[in-house]
Image (spheres, rainbow, N blue to C red):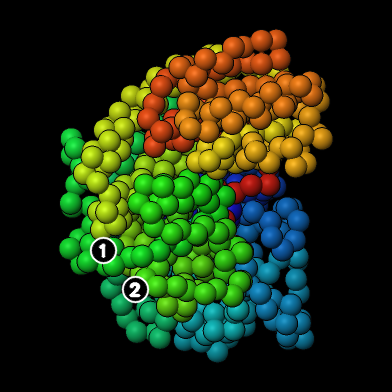
Amino acid sequence: MCGIVGAVAERQVTPILIEGLKRLEYRGYDSSGIAVIDPETGSLKRLRRLGKVNELVKANQEQGTEGTVGIAHTRWATHGRPSEANAHPHLSGHKLAIVHNGIIENYEVLREQLKANGYEFSSETDTEIIAHTIHQALKTSESLLDAVQRSVTQFEGAYGLAVVSLDYPDQIVIARKGSPLVLGLGIGENFIASDQLALLPVTNRFIFIEEGDTGIVERDKISLFDKDGNVVEREVHEFDAEHDSGDKGEFRHYMLKEIYEQPRSIQATLDGRITDTKLSDTIFTEAELDILKEVDRVQIVACGTSYHAGSVARYWLEDIVGLPCQIEVASEFRYRKKVVLGKTLFVTVSQSGETADTLAALRTSKELGFYATLVICNVPGSSLVRESDMCLMTNAGAEIGVASTKAFTTQLVALLLLTLQLGKSNGLSEEKEKEVVRELRMLPSYIEATLLIDKQIQLLAHRFADKHNTLFLGRGVQYPIAMEGALKLKEISYIHAEAYPAGELKHGPLALVDENMPIVAVAPNNELHEKLKSNLEEVRARGGELYVFADKSAGLNPDNDFHVVELPSVGDVVAPIVYTVPLQLLSYYVAEQKGTDIDQPRNLAKSVTVE
Ligand code: G6P
C-alpha cells in the first residue's frame, strides 16, 4: 500500500528519501516519486516513475534532485490506473507539492468546485484535489499550516499527508486522519514516514501522529496540533534497532528469511511470559487482569492471515477453556448488525496494527458496547495498539515479505497465551496449563526440526508449478491451517487454491478431483486422524494426487500418487503452529519455480490502510 517518506535536513535528502522508499517497497506499490526543495536556490524539483523504485533511482542519476527538504511516495493505485501522471507527489502551481496516503471520498464534488475556480487537473487521482485545495486556501492563509488545517476540514475519507511549498522552504506540513504517519527525530534534522521502518537508517526515536493531528516539521523543531488546533506534545518512543530486519542476509527472499526466523521470533513472543510450568503473572497489569477475569465470551475480528490465526484460536478457546468464541473477517463485521452478549472481549489480530477494516471494526466495537478490547499485534505504537484497551505484542520483529509467515505463527503463540490467561478464570486445571506450557517451551525446537524437511519440500514443488488449481484439506483446528496454506499459495504463486474441511469433500469439491488437481492435506496424529484418512482414500479412489503432511507416527504408506512428508511428533495443542511451516515452504518453493515476485506479489500490499 502507499508509502510516504519526508526529510528536513542540513544535508542532501534525496538519498534518505530513496532509501526510505526502498524500505517501504515491501508494502506493495506500482509507481514512485520524489519532490525536493533547495532553499538556497529556491527550486522545487519533482521526479516520478512508473514501476520499481530503481526506475526512480535511474531517473535521479540522469536528472538529479538537489535539496535539503523533500517528500517522497510509493503509490498503490486506488483512483486512477498506475501511471507516471497518477504517481505522487502532486503539484499545484510550481511551488506546492504533496504526497498522500488514503482515499478522499468526496473528491468528485471537490474536483468540480476546483475546476469552476479555474484549476486544471493532470491526473485521475483523488489526491490532486488536495494539492489544489491547499493551493487555493494558501491565497487567504497566514501560513502553510493554516492552509492545510483549513483544507482538511473539507475532506471526507482518510489521509496521511505531507506538504512542501517553496514559500515555506524549511518546513514539511503534515496531517493525519485514518492513515498512519510517524515522525523520526534527529539532531538538526527531522523526518516523516508512513511506517517507522522507512526511517531506521536515520533515527530510532519516533513520535506517532495521532488521529486528527496536524503539524510543522522543521530541522530543529516539531510543532504538533490536535484536531481542535491546540498545541500538543506527543510521547517519544525509542525503537529497538534489533528489530530492524532491513536486509535479507544469506536468503534470496525476505519470505524465506522470515520462515527461517520463526524459532527465534516464537521464542521472543514467549520470553518472560511463561515459567517452567505455568503462565507468568506479569503479562497483563493488575487492572487488565481484573477485566480479563470477568470475560465470559470472545469475539475475534481480523483480516487475511490474521483472520486464520483468530480462527485457530476459536478452537483453542472453546476446547481448552470452554469460552464461547466467534470469529469474523473485519470487512464483514464492520457493516453487519450485531448482538453483543454478556461480557464479550473484543479481540483484534493484526500484524501491522493499521489495517483499515480491522481498525474500523475496533471503533465499531466501542460504539456497540463490547466489554473490553484487546489487540494481538506486531507493531508497537500502531493505531490498533493505541486504540485498544489492552495489547499483547507478538514481538516477531519487522516482517517485510508481503505474505505473512513469522507474524502468523507468533500471533498463534500470543493467542495461545491469551487462551491460557482466560483459562485461569474459567476452570483450566494446573495440569492442563502445565501441559500447554511444556509444549510451548518445546515449540522453537519443533519448528527447527520441521525446517529440516526443507529439501524434501523443494523437490515436491515442481509438481505444482504447472498446475492451475490446488485443494488444501484439514480437519478441526487444522482446517484454518489448510486455509492459511491455500492463501499462501495463491498470494505468491498465483495458483488458485482452496481450502476445505476434509469432511466436506463429498458435498461438492470431490467433483473437481482428477490428475491435474494436487491435493494437500495436513494430518497430525490427532483424534480426527482416522476420519481424515478415509477422506484421503475418497480422493485417491478418484485419481487425485495427494501430498500429505503427517506425524511420523501416523503410519501412512506412501505410494506413486500418495506423497507423505513426515513431521516430528508434537502435542495436539501446538500442532497447528508446527504444520504451518511446511505449507509456507511449499508455497515459497512453488513460487520460486514459477519465478514470481515472491516478496512483493502482484496487486497485493503488506498493510492495507484503505478500505
Ligand atoms: C494484507 C496482507 C496480509 C495480511 C492482511 C491483514 O492483505 O497482504 O498478509 O494478513 O493484510 O493485515 P494485518 O496487518 O492486519 O495482519
Mark 2 residue element: strand
The image quarter in which residue 72 lies: bottom right
Q: Which mark is residue 223?
A: 2
Res 434 seen here: yes
Instruction: Identify the mark nearer the N-term, 1 or 2.
Output: 2
Spatial separation of the CA atoms under disc 1 and disc 2: 42 Å
Residue type of the residue flagged with mark 1:
Lys
State yes or no: Cβ of the residue under disc 2 lies below 8 Å from any atom of ligand 1.
Answer: no
Q: Which mark is residue 293?
A: 1
Judge left or right: residue 126 versus residue 287: right
Residue drawn at the location 60% of the way across and 30% of the way down: 532
Residue drawn at the location 46% of the way across and 51% of the way down: 314
Residue 31 location in percent, x, y?
66, 49
Residue 605 location in percent, x, y?
59, 49
Image quarter (top left, top right, bottom left or bottom right) of the C terminus: bottom right
Residue drawn at the location 52% of the way across and 74% of the way down: 339
Residue drawn at the location 22% of the way across and 66% of the way down: 290
State yes or no: Cβ of the residue under disc 1 lies below 8 Å from any atom of ligand 1.
Answer: no
